[in-house]
Image (spheres, coloured by chain):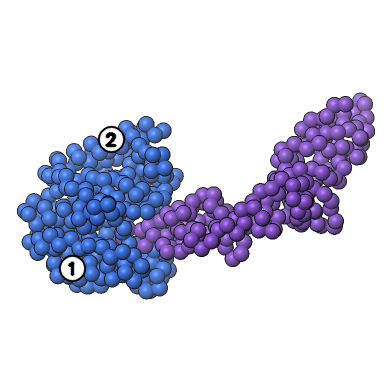
Amino acid sequence: MKSDALWLRAQIMKAVRDFFWERGFLEVETPLLIPANAPEEHINPVITTSSWQLQTSPEICMKRLLSAGHRKLFQISRCWRSDERGSRHLSEFTMLEWYCADCDYHTLMADCEELLQHVARTCRPENPFFEHKSATINPFAPWQRITVQEAFARFGDCEVWECLRTGLYEEKLTAVIEPALAGFAAPVILLDYPAELAALARVKPENSNLAERFELYVGGLELANGFSELNDPLEQRRRFEEANAARSRAGQSVLPVPEPFLDTLGSMPDSAGIALGLDRLVMLTAGADSIDDVVAFTPEEL
Amino acid sequence: MLFQNTLCEDHMYTVADLKKGLKIILDGDPYLVVAFDFVKPGKGQALYRTKMRNMINGSLLDRTYRSGESFEPASLEERTMEFLYKEGDHYTFMDQQTYEQVVMEEETLGDAKNYLLENLKAEVMLFGEKAIGISLPNFVNLRVTATEQWAKGDTSGNDSKPATVETGYVLRVPPFIEEGELIVIDTRTGEYSTRVKG
């Protein structure tokens, strides 16, 4: 029932806010309408008639706040990504992001464990589990951490680099790896992504082919994407240009580069940040298989 | 022909048009999209996963598409036609308005062949010039041409018996149905529905 899901959604919002307030995070609101998002090869912003864009993520502004000296930040905000619509996607959706100075992606993984346990305990006290596609996932059971290379070798029977080279990465990930992760009774963290799949993340100090990036999967559903933040403005500019070059090759529009972000990135401390799909967290808590079931209105209903 | 050849290049579908119920042409055959999902791994390329049914032979196909791909719309037309006659495995129908005739093979007709009596009106699905499917009225009246006499006092407990109707179709009917009677058959289930009195 949709009204139940909306109640649950409100409870989750409150539980998430309480969680970060209790841990001393500052709740912020940054502008939704901005001149430029971080250009990415496969993310298309909604561009308004004034040529400004709706945010695809609050990332750019949140990191500028870190550069300005804030240490722990969180935000729950609407994000827009053009032409994304499916059983797990809405073009307009709700993102939870949090950032922390002097942290790395391991800190965020630990945050995720505590956050999901808190939400399960608070919003499903009788039955503190998540549900997805008839699977039950226990956030209190030991979480699995698997590197991307390991996951491709173990479940996909292939080399991740080979899949990337042949353009089969997404197919393999969604058709083979994610269904395999759905079989785990606890949440799973896929970590250490190929650097080319992490445009804003720091590479591992001991291996520049891998980025300090991870994805959280619950019941095979991709819930959050976090990483240690790149804070080298030259390298960041080079990656933005690379993303735009790839867009151009694919016949996609070249996107403006967020210059004020690059101007301040050099003063951002070593940090880590993460984006979690709040609608999907509601899906998992409600046991809903479609994102349509946890929002007040879908675009088709408007 | 009506609705035909009115679609040109700029009416191609793109991946953004994919949804349940869309009809497209693949390898020359019309396909109906029966399931669709948009899949996009974090920061990765979008995939458009479909399950499609071949509208000619009913076979199912899984296909995954990426941004930038396009599809030719399948232009299909349903027309009311009258069944004229059968010759071997071939069944001929005629459009009463245009007198245009189409031939359907027994295999394409499926169970519909059991109910085809001359002059029956049905909706014929046309893909270009080719008839690829038929939908019949939910109920048809057919005369029983052969069935055994119901023996009074039969205590075997059978509450039905086989009967053959004028198309040659054999079905179970209640024991009281006699040869020469007109019965109503539900074409969706192939079962006896009631008898036509008088």
Q: Amino acid at mark 2?
A: Ala
* Label 2: which secondary element: helix
Front of the two marks 2 and 1: 1
Going 69% across and 59% down the picture, which residue do you hit? B129
* Mark 2 belongs to chain: A
Q: Which residue is mark 2?
A: A10
Answer left or right for B120 relative to A39.
right
- The total of numbered circles placed on residues is 2
Going 37% across and 74% down the picture, which residue do you hit? A165
Q: Colour of chain B?
A: purple
User: Which of the chains is blue?
Assistant: A
Badge 2: residue crowd in 10 Å (few <14, some 14–19, many ≥20): few
**Residue A16, percent across and down?**
22, 41
**Residue B42, percent across and down?**
32, 58
- Numbered label attached to residue B115: none
Q: Which residue is mark 1?
A: A237
Q: Nearer the viewer, residue B97 or A82?
A: B97
Q: Amino acid at mark 1?
A: Arg
| The N terminus of chain B: image quadrant | bottom right
- Asked if residue A186 can be seen in this view, the reply is no
**Mark 2 / mark 1, whichever is N-terminal:** 2
Q: Is residue A178 above or below residue B152?
A: below
Going 26% across and 63% down the picture, which residue do you hit? A255
| The C terminus of chain B: image quadrant | top right
Q: Nearer the viewer, residue A161 or B102?
A: B102
| Spatial separation of the CA atoms under disc 2 and disc 1 | 39 Å
* Label 1: which secondary element: helix
* Mark 1 belongs to chain: A
**Residue B111, percent across and down?**
75, 48
Q: Are marks 2 and 1 on the same chain?
A: yes
- Asked if residue B147 can be seen in this view, the reply is yes
